[in-house]
Amino acid sequence: MADNGVTCSMSRSGNVWDNAAMESFFSSLKTERIGRRVYRTRDQAKADVFDYIERFYNPRRRHSTLGYLSPIDFEKQSEVA
Protein backbone atom coordinates (compact mmCIF):
# COMPACT_ATOMS: atom_id res chain seq x y z
CA MET A 1 0.00 0.00 0.00
CA ALA A 2 2.77 2.41 0.90
CA ASP A 3 4.35 1.91 -2.54
CA ASN A 4 1.17 3.34 -4.05
CA GLY A 5 0.84 6.26 -1.63
CA VAL A 6 -2.01 4.71 0.33
CA THR A 7 -2.08 4.94 4.11
CA CYS A 8 -3.66 1.98 5.82
CA SER A 9 -6.37 2.95 8.30
CA MET A 10 -6.66 0.45 11.11
CA SER A 11 -8.38 0.64 14.44
CA ARG A 12 -7.40 -1.31 17.50
CA SER A 13 -7.60 -5.04 17.17
CA GLY A 14 -10.97 -6.42 18.08
CA ASN A 15 -12.90 -3.32 16.95
CA VAL A 16 -15.37 -5.10 14.71
CA TRP A 17 -17.33 -1.97 13.79
CA ASP A 18 -14.43 -0.20 12.08
CA ASN A 19 -15.38 -1.16 8.55
CA ALA A 20 -18.83 -2.71 8.95
CA ALA A 21 -20.66 -0.28 6.65
CA MET A 22 -18.28 -0.81 3.73
CA GLU A 23 -18.16 -4.56 4.25
CA SER A 24 -21.96 -4.62 4.14
CA PHE A 25 -21.98 -2.55 0.93
CA PHE A 26 -19.40 -4.74 -0.81
CA SER A 27 -21.28 -7.86 0.24
CA SER A 28 -24.46 -6.46 -1.32
CA LEU A 29 -22.60 -5.43 -4.45
CA LYS A 30 -21.09 -8.88 -4.90
CA THR A 31 -24.30 -10.75 -4.11
CA GLU A 32 -26.71 -8.57 -6.06
CA ARG A 33 -24.61 -7.57 -9.04
CA ILE A 34 -21.03 -8.48 -9.86
CA GLY A 35 -21.03 -12.04 -8.59
CA ARG A 36 -23.15 -13.08 -11.55
CA ARG A 37 -21.36 -11.16 -14.29
CA VAL A 38 -18.25 -11.43 -16.38
CA TYR A 39 -16.74 -8.18 -17.63
CA ARG A 40 -14.64 -7.99 -20.77
CA THR A 41 -12.98 -4.71 -19.82
CA ARG A 42 -12.25 -2.67 -16.72
CA ASP A 43 -14.33 0.18 -18.16
CA GLN A 44 -17.31 -2.15 -18.52
CA ALA A 45 -16.96 -3.20 -14.87
CA LYS A 46 -16.65 0.40 -13.69
CA ALA A 47 -19.73 1.43 -15.65
CA ASP A 48 -21.77 -1.45 -14.23
CA VAL A 49 -20.74 -0.70 -10.64
CA PHE A 50 -21.60 2.97 -11.19
CA ASP A 51 -24.98 1.92 -12.58
CA TYR A 52 -25.61 -0.31 -9.55
CA ILE A 53 -24.83 2.49 -7.10
CA GLU A 54 -26.52 5.41 -8.87
CA ARG A 55 -29.55 3.70 -10.42
CA PHE A 56 -30.35 1.01 -7.83
CA TYR A 57 -28.47 1.10 -4.51
CA ASN A 58 -29.02 4.76 -3.65
CA PRO A 59 -32.42 5.54 -5.20
CA ARG A 60 -34.34 2.25 -4.85
CA ARG A 61 -32.68 -0.35 -2.61
CA ARG A 62 -34.22 -0.38 0.85
CA HIS A 63 -31.85 -0.47 3.82
CA SER A 64 -32.81 -1.94 7.17
CA THR A 65 -30.65 0.58 9.06
CA LEU A 66 -32.64 3.41 7.44
CA GLY A 67 -36.03 2.06 8.45
CA TYR A 68 -36.37 0.18 5.16
CA LEU A 69 -36.09 3.37 3.10
CA SER A 70 -33.71 3.97 0.22
CA PRO A 71 -30.86 6.38 0.99
CA ILE A 72 -32.45 9.05 -1.23
CA ASP A 73 -35.87 8.65 0.42
CA PHE A 74 -34.21 8.77 3.84
CA GLU A 75 -32.47 12.04 2.96
CA LYS A 76 -35.73 13.54 1.66
CA GLN A 77 -37.51 12.53 4.85
CA SER A 78 -34.72 14.03 6.97
CA GLU A 79 -34.95 17.36 5.10
CA VAL A 80 -38.66 17.65 5.86
CA ALA A 81 -38.24 16.91 9.57
Image (cartoon, rainbow, N blue to C red):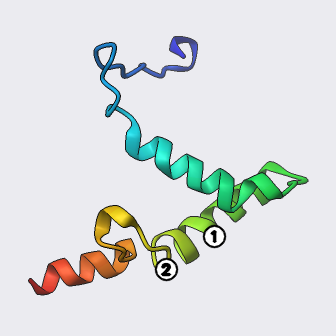
Classify 35 as above or below 79. above
Q: Nearer the viewer, residue 50 or 20?
A: 20
Seen at 30% across and 23% down, the residue is: 15
**Residue with the mark numbered 1:** 51
Q: Secondary structure at mark 2?
A: loop
Name the residue at 39% across, 35% down: 19
Say whether residue 26 is left or right of residue 66: right
Left or right of 81: which side holds 18?
right
Q: Quadrant of the N terminus?
A: top right
Q: Amino acid at mark 1?
A: Asp
Amino acid at circle 2: Arg
Quick one: label 1, few (<14), some, or many (20+) residues within 10 Å? few
**54 to 60, vertically: above or below:** above
Q: How many marks?
A: 2
**x then y, percent, for residue 18:** 33, 31
Q: Which residue corresponds to the image point at 33% horizontal and 82% vertical from the top-left?
A: 73
Image disc number at residue 60: 2
Quarter of image, res 10 = top left
